[in-house]
Amino acid sequence: MLTGSAYLGEVLIKGAVEGLELLPAGRMPANPSELLGAPMMRDLLRELAADRLVIIDAPPVLRFTDGVVLAAHSGGVILVARAGRTSAEDLREAALAVEQGGGRMLGVVLNNVSEPGGKRKGVRGSAVPAESVPPRLLTCVMIGTWRLWDL
């Protein structure tokens, strides 16, 4: 779509939940970061956010620049870290990269946390006050090599 090969209405996919729409990444272009930083991407995100809550699932910020580039176009970033795998230094480095790239850090979600007794739980996190969360556009950035749906 960003290369001009399709229109938004042609590529949005209805989700299993009413009101949920997905916009798949499509084919990998030769210059993904340049495309994500282009005015066309900014315009697309503004169009989507005009009447939707937009959550961008970006690749790991320490391995790819995509998340940092997208963060500059969004209202805020929630980093996703994995307990036992993501170091405090990696977390600091990822947050710094987001902020230096023009993004706004909202917080961190820590997943794969063990409860007392060794039982694994899926997700742990802290709440962000509702008034501090931009209403329409968030970027979720991974830190490690796993994906959000591994939760």
Image: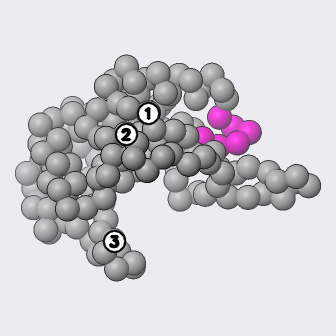
The three-letter amino acid code for the residue at tag 1 is Met
Residue 11 placement (x, y as % from top left)? 20, 65
Q: Which secondary structure class fits the magenta region best? A: loop
Dot 3 amino acid type: Leu
Q: Are marks 1 and 3 in contact (CB under 8 Å)?
A: no
Q: Which residue is mark 1?
A: 105
Between discs 3 and 2, the one toward the N terminus: 3
Q: Nearer the viewer, residue 129 or 141?
A: 129
Is residue 68 visible in the rendered image? The answer is: no
- State whether residue 54 appears in this view: yes
Q: Is residue 123 magenta?
A: no
**Residue carrying label 3:** 20
> Which of 27/60 is in front?
60
Residue depth check, mark 1 versus mark 3: number of the one nearer the observer: 1
Tell whether 19 sits left or right of 42.
Answer: right
Query: Which residue lies at the image location 56% right of the left edge and 48% below the top edge?
Result: 127
- The x and y percentages for residue 109 are 58, 45
In the rendered structure, which segment of residues is drawn in magenta? 81-86
> Which is nearer the N-term, disc 1 or disc 3?
3
The Cα atoms of the two marked residues, 1 and 3, are separated by: 25 Å
Local secondary structure at mark 1 = strand
Q: Measured from the top left, where is residue 145 in percent x and y?
A: 55, 41
Q: CA distance from mark 3 to mark 2?
A: 20 Å
- Residue 87 is drawn in which quadrant? top right
Label 2 CA crowd tier, 10 Å (few <14, some 14–19, many 20+)? many
Res 76 label? 2
Residue 82, horizontal then vertical, whole percent: 65, 43
